[in-house]
């Protein structure tokens, strides 16, 4: 069983939901990323989503755009991100790590080479925001060959036929985008999520995580009751942005512990 | 075998496709279906033809630039006068087509990205014409260098949103327009300005711009009794070029030459010429194309004197025409384009856009190597009134 399956299976036995924080690799500085990943796990994270910086993050709101810009000031590229995962894995062999980003940095490296490196360093899943299933055949052949889970987004606008298409290809978990908009937007609609998740369950047997726009513990709790895991990105990245360097790990840990408690209390 | 691209999934050979976030996939699919339906609808075609004739002022004439040709001492240069269209560029051909489609799809809010501002002005114009709300995203740097167009858009009732992220130019304006679209997808029609982006845009924009080449194919035989020896157009995203080129693809005796922005020269990397500089293939803004980027796959910052060509990618059909060898692509530097700009002003009494000046400069470069009985047809894609501040500043003049 993969690390992702192990994790969700264990959570299910405990009757708990997954907390999946997102941070951008190299933000605000490459040297803090691995300690930050460990701190997230210590504070209660179940799966880590690690953002690969990209010059043109079209699906992201201003908070994660700025995180990408800070990382790119240090020239953090895909090779560096993979190296960070390798370093993380030397101390943590259990927590799943999912790389999230845009297709072009991977295209530049080559999917075959990328998938092989992912397997070597211990990446568990890859989410490429701008590669829909129709354009992903070659990419996912290489990922599957190395046991890396292709993670797909499903949006409020996704129709039944496309849900079925994603269900066929997706591994690990499916990421439901809880709003029409960019990451970190403020128009999340709980009733829409409550309505959509059962529709997804008709086709999708793997766990369903929900993200985009989850900005506080109460929303995290309410959303987690409807699905298998919550993804929190912009709110954490904002904490990184607003923290003084020597307080950052502490502030992020406090925030993530609060999310953890809220999620566990609601189920 | 006849040329028939893109395929059903929007690919021109290995280029094109649909690379978008899931939220927008249903929107581009709806757009594809609606476009394919209305493209062949007689009422739609009749309305578009009426608007192009009576509102845009088509057909645009072809003009023999005889003075300039004589000075160059070789091939005769003819100009397809897209600068004489309403709003002063070819952009209105496409904006009009997409606006009519938006109306039929019931969308009352339109958004657009713009570089030089000509597509923004065209979008603001058709929005005013049809009573639609219009938001135009424009890089903060482009707002500086194209300030007359910014005011024109405001006069026309559009909201111009400055984009401060990244290089603050056209690619960043595209990013921001896509972010708006993903947020307002149900109410909003994205009037995309060039023959790039996710399918069906490269095909649809091309089809709307093909009026340029279709007219030229009728006009040239009327003027000189035959087709030209070569057709030449500037290529940023490449919409004016594909509009002229596409109808000539099956005319094998006609050379097709696309002119990219060579900026300060290809050697130093300060340019916007992904085809000529042999950039790697990559994915940006919904399609797979030749793309200026670094080793990490980060999109490169580009340079061109002309905001409308200042873009790291290029439309997928141009990538395919390059690979198949049907079209040639070359680059012209800022300085060469500026000289052509001044020459056309002085010798023909026409102020060309800096974008179009790249195509003019290449014609001026090759004309002297050709016989006087040979003919070059250059797409004069826009007028240069918007560029007078830029040109004056480079000449050390404050207006």
Image (tube, rainbow, N blue to C red):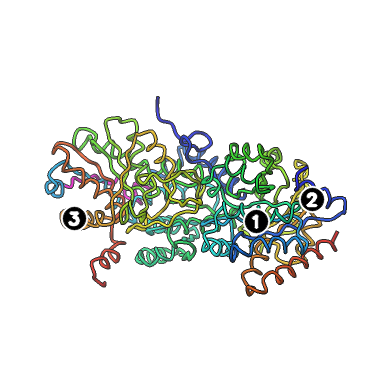
> What SS does tag 1 mark?
strand
What residue is shown at x 47% (from left), y 61% (from top)?
B137
The numbered mark, 1 or 2, whose residue comes first in the sequence reads 2
- Of the 4 image quadrants, the one containing the N terminus of chain B is top left
Q: Residue furthest front?
A: A90
What residue is shown at x 79% (from left), y 57% (from top)?
A224
Q: Residue furthest top?
A: B1
Q: CA distance from mark 1 to mark 2?
A: 17 Å
A187 with respect to B63 (left or right): right
Q: Which residue is tagged 3?
A: B343
Q: Which residue is tagged 1?
A: A50
Q: Quadrant of residue A185?
A: bottom right
Q: Which residue is tagged 2?
A: A7
Q: CA distance from mark 1 to mark 3?
A: 55 Å
> What SS does tag 3 mark?
helix
* Contact between labelled residues 3 and 2, with CB atoms less than 8 Å apart: no
Tell me, yes or no, whether the highlighted magenta stretch contains residue B286: no
- Of the 4 image quadrants, the one containing the C terminus of chain B is bottom left
Percent from the top left, x then y, of residue B265? 30, 53
Q: Chain of mark 2?
A: A
Respond whether the residues carrying marks 1 and 3 are from the same subunit. Answer: no
The magenta region covers B51-65
B330 with respect to B343 (left or right): right
């Amino acid at each position: 069983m993969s690390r992702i399956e192990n994790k969700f299976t264990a959570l299910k036995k405990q009757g708990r939901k997954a907390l999946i924080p997102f941070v951008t690799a190299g933000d605000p500085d490459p040297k803090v990323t691995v300690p930050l990943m460990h701190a997230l796990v210590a504070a209660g994270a179940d799966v880590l989503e690690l953002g690969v910086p990209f010059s043109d993050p079209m699906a992201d709101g201003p908070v994660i755009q700025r995180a990408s810009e800070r990382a790119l000031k240090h020239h953090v590229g895909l090779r560096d991100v993979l190296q960070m995962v390798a370093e993380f894995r030397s101390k943590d062999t259990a927590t799943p790590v999912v790389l999230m980003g845009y297709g072009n940095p991977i295209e530049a490296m080559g999917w075959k080479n990328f998938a092989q490196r992912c397997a070597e360093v211990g990446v568990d899943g890859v989410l490429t925001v701008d590669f829909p299933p129709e354009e992903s055949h070659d990419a996912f052949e290489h990922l599957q060959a190395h046991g890396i889970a292709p993670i797909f987004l499903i949006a409020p606008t996704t129709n039944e036929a496309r849900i079925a298409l994603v269900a066929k290809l997706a591994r690990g978990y499916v990421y439901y985008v809880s709003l029409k908009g960019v990451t970190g937007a403020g128009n999340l609609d709980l009733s829409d999520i409550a309505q959509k998740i059962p529709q997804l369950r008709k086709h999708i047997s793997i766990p369903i995580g929900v993200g985009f726009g989850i900005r506080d513990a109460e929303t995290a709790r309410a959303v987690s009751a409807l699905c298998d895991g919550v993804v929190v990105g912009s709110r954490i990245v904002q904490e990184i942005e607003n923290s003084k360097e020597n307080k950052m790990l502490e502030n992020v840990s406090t925030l993530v512990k609060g999310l953890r408690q809220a999620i566990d209390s609601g189920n | 075998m006849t040329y028939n691209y893109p395929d059903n999934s929007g690919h021109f050979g290995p280029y094109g496709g649909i690379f978008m976030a899931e939220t927008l996939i249903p929107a581009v699919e709806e757009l594809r279906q609606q476009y394919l339906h209305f493209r062949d609808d007689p009422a739609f075609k009749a309305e578009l033809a009426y608007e192009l004739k009576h509102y845009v002022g088509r057909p645009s004439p072809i003009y023999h630039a005889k003075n300039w040709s004589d000075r160059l001492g070789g091939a005769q240069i003819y100009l397809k006068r897209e600068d004489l269209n309403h709003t002063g560029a070819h952009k209105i051909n496409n904006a009009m087509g997409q606006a009519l489609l938006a109306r039929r799809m019931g969308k009352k809010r339109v958004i657009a990205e713009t570089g030089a501002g000509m597509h923004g002005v065209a979008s603001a114009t058709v929005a005013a014409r049809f009573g639609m709300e219009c938001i135009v995203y424009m890089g903060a740097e482009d707002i500086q260098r194209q300030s007359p167009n910014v005011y024109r858009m405001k006069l026309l009732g559009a909201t111009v949103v400055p984009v401060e992220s990244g290089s603050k130019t056209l690619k960043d304006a595209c990013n921001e327009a896509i972010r708006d679209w993903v947020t307002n997808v149900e109410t909003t029609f994205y009037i995309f300005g060039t023959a790039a982006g996710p399918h069906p845009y490269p095909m649809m924009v091309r089809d709307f711009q093909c009026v340029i080449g279709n007219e030229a194919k009728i006009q040239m035989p009327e003027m000189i009794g035959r087709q030209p020896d070569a057709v030449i157009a500037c290529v940023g995203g490449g919409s004016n070029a594909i509009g002229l080129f596409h109808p000539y693809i099956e005319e094998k005796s006609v050379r097709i030459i696309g002119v990219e922005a060579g900026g300060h020269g290809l050697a130093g990397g300060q340019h916007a010429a992904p085809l000529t500089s042999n950039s790697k293939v990559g994915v940006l803004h919904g399609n797979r194309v030749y793309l200026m980027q670094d080793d990490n796959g980060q999109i490169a910052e580009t340079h061109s004197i002309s905001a409308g060509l200042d873009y790291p990618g290029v439309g997928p059909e141009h990538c395919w025409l390059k690979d198949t060898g049907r079209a040639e692509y070359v680059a012209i530097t800022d300085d060469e384009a500026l000289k052509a700009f001044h020459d056309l002003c002085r010798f023909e009494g026409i102020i060309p856009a800096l974008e179009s000046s790249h195509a003019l400069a290449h014609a001026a470069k090759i004309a002297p190597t050709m016989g006087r009985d040979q003919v070059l047809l250059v797409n004069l894609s826009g007028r240069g009134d918007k560029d007078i501040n830029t040109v004056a500043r480079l000449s050390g003049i404050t207006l």
